[in-house]
Image: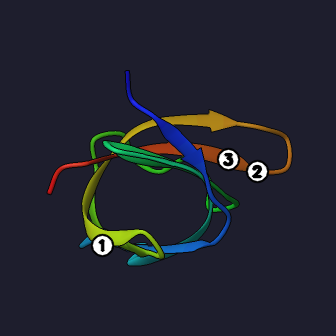
Amino acid sequence: MTRVTPRRGRCDASSNAPRNEVEVDLMDIGASGFRARHRHGLLPLGANAAFRHPEGAGRVRVVWNWMYPDHVETGFVVIR
């Protein structure tokens, strides 16, 4: 079972996509990824990006988005 630890903080993610850098609010961090809240619309599923947050840095893939009226939550899985 993967343990998820709630964390607050910022995470910067960047990719080669036109929208080069996205700043998000961390919600949960686990051994294999993290969940973040933002207002940047849906991030492309399957997109890879570099990330940096207080618990580490590396590369992630966008695996899901959940739309709310005032924000989006996105799930990222660490790929290295």
Location of the N terminus by quadrant is: top left
Question: Which dot, 3 or 1, sits closer to the camera?
Answer: 1
**Distance from the alpha carbon under mark 3 to that under mark 1:** 22 Å
**Residue tagged by mark 3?**
72
Q: Is residue 25 left or right of residue 74?
A: right
**Distance from the alpha carbon under mark 2 to that under mark 3:** 4 Å
State the residue at coordinates (36%, 40%): 45
Disc 1 is placed on an element classified as: strand
Q: Residue 19: x and y, percent?
A: 43, 73
State the residue at coordinates (44%, 78%): 21
Disc 2 is placed on an element classified as: loop
State the residue at coordinates (28%, 55%): 60
Circles 2 and 3 in contact, beta carbons < 8 Å: yes
Name above or below for residue 79 compared with residue 11: above
For the image, the number of numbered tags is 3
Q: Residue 64: x and y, percent?
A: 46, 34
**Residue tagged by mark 2?**
71
Q: Residue 41: x and y, percent?
A: 62, 53
Q: Which residue of the protein is positioned furthest toward the top in this rendering?
A: 1
Q: Is residue 22 left or right of residue 71?
A: left
- The part of the image, by quadrant, that contains residue 7 is bottom right
Q: Residue 68: x and y, percent?
A: 78, 38
Mark 2 packing: few (<14 Cα in 10 Å), some, or many (20+)? some
State the residue at coordinates (30%, 72%): 57
Instruction: Name which of mark 3 and mark 1 comes first in the sequence.
Output: 1
Instruction: Name which of mark 1 and mark 2 comes first in the sequence.
Output: 1
